């Protein structure tokens, strides 16, 4: 989380430093829940890839010829410690990681709508293992910070980044609820797959608006319900078996939230149904996946009987 010296000083710098120190102490604990990810991170970080390619659907870090059979076994075992792999695809020294989500497809949908990323300061909130951050690297941003409270993803991202030898990408254990500590800091913010997990989504959008520099851009992606009316579903307990889901809006509802949070030109640029082609069980994610979350007799409904989800993509400016 050592990137603050690359940003203008925040008026809340002391608070950030204090919270970073507390998070670092927390994650440094020698307890099983931390060591299970810290150990593979340390083991993998000793390998340095010569070939790195972030320009294609599969993020490639090292190729098979760079390592011997013994190293291949060690690297595979350590990569598997980060299971379940939710986001990908990656290939690490020739080991193909087929993650649950094929999020190269999400990136393809974003591509025509990306703002200029060159020399920009970017935040990817809820960055998971950093797949999109790696895809941003070829655009030569000044700095990319992933905000991600999960210990698993915190160490997984750093293992991948260290093997790739990329120096302008960092991960911060602070969550979106602390983004207000960074006023007028970012040129571009990505908020994907997060907003329906927040109890106060409009407050999140207001905080993100405040964290953007004037003229900055938000790229927002969310699970949504189908429909052209400005409604949001509020599930009783779970939505498509996922607990911690609060408001699931229609695309137009999300657009209204953005406008009410202050965004100019809030625009819905893509809507598509979710499917088990993009989200499925694999050798690297062996638990239930999308098809298990739907009503067996009617795939237009979730297992709880709510409308089955689609995905929406929006863009807005400060
Ligand atoms: C559904 S995944 C989306 C991952 C990725 N952004 C994508 O679109 O594919 C949600 C991510 O948000 C992270 N997350 C959970 N709580 C968060 C919080 N308070 N702030 C930021 N991210 C959070 C999760 O750990 C997870 O990596």
Image (spheres, helix red, strand yellow):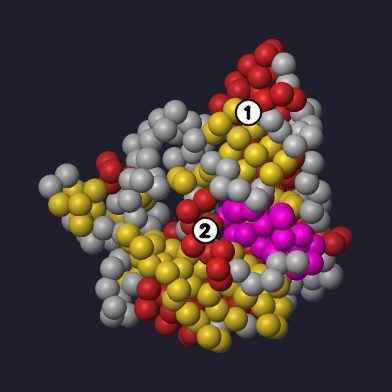
Disc marking residue 108: 2
Up the image or down, 135 lies above or below 314; here it is: above
Residue 79 pos. (x, y %): 60, 28
Element type where label 2 sits in the image:
helix
- Residue furthest left as drawn: 297
Count of all numbered marks drawn on residues in the image? 2
Residue 183 pos. (x, y %): 71, 75
Q: Which residues are magenta?
A: 119-143
Residue at image coords 49%, 62%:
109
Residue at image coords 45%, 45%:
101
- Residue wearing tag 1: 94
Residue 246 pos. (x, y %): 37, 62
Residue at image coords 28%, 43%:
291
Quarter of the image for the C terminus: give it: bottom right
Crowdedness of circle 2 by 10 Å Cα count: few (<14), some, many (20+)? few
Crowdedness of circle 1 by 10 Å Cα count: few (<14), some, many (20+)? some
| Mark 1 Cβ inside 8 Å of ligand 1 | no
Give the left or right position of residue 235, taking residue 1 as reference: left
| Residue 269 within the segment the image draws in magenta | no
| Residue 125 within the segment the image draws in magenta | yes
Give the left or right position of residue 140, taking residue 245 as reference: right
- Residue furthest right as drawn: 5
């Amino acid at each position: 989380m050592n990137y603050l010296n690359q940003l203008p000083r925040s008026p809340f710098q002391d608070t950030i430093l204090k919270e970073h120190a507390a998070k670092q102490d927390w994650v440094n604990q020698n307890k099983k829940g931390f060591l299970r990810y810290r150990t593979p991170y340390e083991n993998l970080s000793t390998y340095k890839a010569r070939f790195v390619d972030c320009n294609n659907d599969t993020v490639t870090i090292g190729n098979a010829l760079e390592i011997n059979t013994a190293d291949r076994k060690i690297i595979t075992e350590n990569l598997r410690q980060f299971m379940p792999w939710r986001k990908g695809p990656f290939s690490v020294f020739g080991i193909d990681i087929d993650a649950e989500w094929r999020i190269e497809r999400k990136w393809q949908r974003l591509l025509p709508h990306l703002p200029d990323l060159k020399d920009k300061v970017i935040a990817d909130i809820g960055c998971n293992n950093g797949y999109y951050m790696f895809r941003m690297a070829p655009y030569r941003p000044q700095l990319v910070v992933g905000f991600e409270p999960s210990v698993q993803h915190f160490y997984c991202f750093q293992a991948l980044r260290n093997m790739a030898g990329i120096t302008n990408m960092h991960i911060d254990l602070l969550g979106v609820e602390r983004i207000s500590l960074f006023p007028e800091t970012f040129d571009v913010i990505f908020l994907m797959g997060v907003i329906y997990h927040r109890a106060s989504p409009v407050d999140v959008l207001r905080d993100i608006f405040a964290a953007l520099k004037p003229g900055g851009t938000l790229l927002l992606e969310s699970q949504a319900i189908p429909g052209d009316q400005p409604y949001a579903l509020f599930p009783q307990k779970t939505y498509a078996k996922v607990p911690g889901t609060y408001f699931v809006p229609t695309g137009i509802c999300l657009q209204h939230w953005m406008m009410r949070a202050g965004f100019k030109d809030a625009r819905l640029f893509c809507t598509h149904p979710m499917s088990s082609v993009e989200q499925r069980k694999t050798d690297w994610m062996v638990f239930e996946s999308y098809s298990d979350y739907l009503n067996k007799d009617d795939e237009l409904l979730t297992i709880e009987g709510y409308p089955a989800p689609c995905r929406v993509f929006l863009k807005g400016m400060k």
